[in-house]
Amino acid sequence: MTSEWHDMSALALGDGIGRGEIDANELCEHFLARIERIDTEHDIYLRTTPERARAEAAAAAERARKGLRLSPLDGVPISWKDLFDTAGDVTGHGAKVLQERVAASDATVVARAGRAGLVCLGKTNQTEFAFSILGINPNYGTPANPFDDDVARLPGGSTSGGAVSLARGLAAAAIGSDTGGSVRVPAAWNGLVGLKTSFGLLPLKGVLGLSTSMDTVGPLTRDIADAAALFSALAGRYGAGNSHAPDLAGADAARLGLALPAKLVWENLDAGVERAARGAVARLEAAGVTISEAEIPQFAEIEELISHFGPFHAAECHALWHVYIEARPNLVYRPILERIRLGGKMPASEVEGAKQSIRKVAPALHARIREVGVLAMPTIAISPPAIAELENDMEAWMAANIMTLRNTRLGNFLDCTALTLPCGKDDNGIPVGLMLMAPPRWEERLLRMASAMEPILLK
């Protein structure tokens, strides 16, 4: 049975542990052995935490024997992006300039996961400082998308290693961060579910930042049920006698409605992406989901604001990290270095002006969604290009970064809850994601909707 463990959902593994069919110690060793055998270049995991993993697995196994499990995920091994502090380990934000930084304590969400019994396998690769959606990191090596055996394609970022760790069976789930799409983009390109939580809902203490006004934490999982369970763990709903997860049972596709934004997000799609996404919408409609088209003027407004003010979160990133990058700029990948330096040139009045304008637009979008229904769109407009085409071509890198970000970043700037779920594959066999976008704090409602849509989209 061990040969199948890495293909099972996190909840299925947890259920096996609870039933006594899976030993948490053996499960941990299974994943550690796979990491050692498959991740030979160490471009998926920047570092593993075997001592911690074994200790946590042993404790989970003992609880299972005594019938004292902390949650349905107790004993399940997962990966963490290299921006979550884990006590005594290097947390380096995917950057060489932070490779000596050792965390004194666990991030709050890591501690919560521990209280749910989850096992920490290690820290996964990411874009430096989480400041790109493509996933390229020449300093540590870029983990290739596992869905093309012939061409090394982008994994998506910045949670690149996290997505690939799950897609290649090196973890049962992955935890990442999302500031412009950094959970949803790699999830979509790797055939996974990715949940972008509402800003401020999950604590950022012990999470290395990119943007103080938009950073969020979220899970990448094999299915919606796992996403709901991991969300509950990160929200501190498990442990100490508390066990609450979103109720996904009984959702009926025939009672759901989706609105397709009339402009921008459905435009200029790669042919394979459009075919898969339109086909997914057609399957949902055939199953009874009400599909309508709606004008969403706030999308155009936010694009105009970004065009006028620039990416103001670059200023926040510069404030956080410029001392480190300017001390050793030769260690930072040039496109990332230039983007952070750009943030240092942005006037404070422009940064604040952008934030004030966005605070006016976001509530109007939330009201519009309540009027027309949850928004649906392709998660990413394009299929992943080859890594070699972009790595040393800054112009091509920037163009791909903008198009990859186009749809997902709207949810971050406009303070939305969003998730992506697999809806098909493009002409090269690369997964395509369908994104659902809703007002903040709609996580449970969105997960419930997605649980009804998931079996339809998998047909």
Image: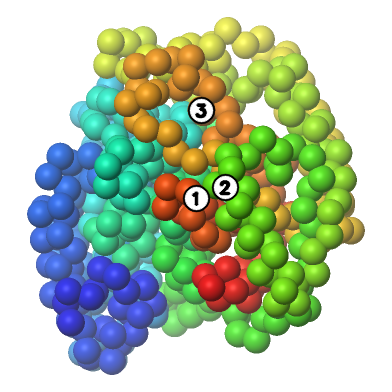
> In what element is the residue under mark 1?
loop
Q: Is residue 250 above or below residue 382?
A: below
Give the class, few, some or many, for how many residues have Cα within 10 Å of label 2's Cα (few <14, many ≥20): many
Residue annotated with mark 3: 400
**Image location (x, y in percent) of residue 134:** 44, 34
Nearest the viewer among 33 and 432 is 432
Asked if the residue under mark 1 is in contact with the one under mark 2, i.e. CB atoms within 8 Å, the reply is: yes
34 with respect to 232 (left or right): left
**Image location (x, y in percent) of residue 159:** 40, 43
- For badge 2, the amino acid type reads Val
Residue annotated with mark 2: 273
> In what element is the residue under mark 3?
helix
Residue annotated with mark 1: 426
**Image location (x, y in percent) of residue 148:** 32, 47
Q: Does label 2 or label 1 sit earlier along the sequence?
A: 2
Q: Is residue 428 visible?
A: yes
Q: Does label 3 or label 1 sit earlier along the sequence?
A: 3
User: Which residue: 57% across, 19% down?
Assistant: 315
| Marks 3, 1: nearer the viewer | 1
- For badge 3, the amino acid type reads Ala
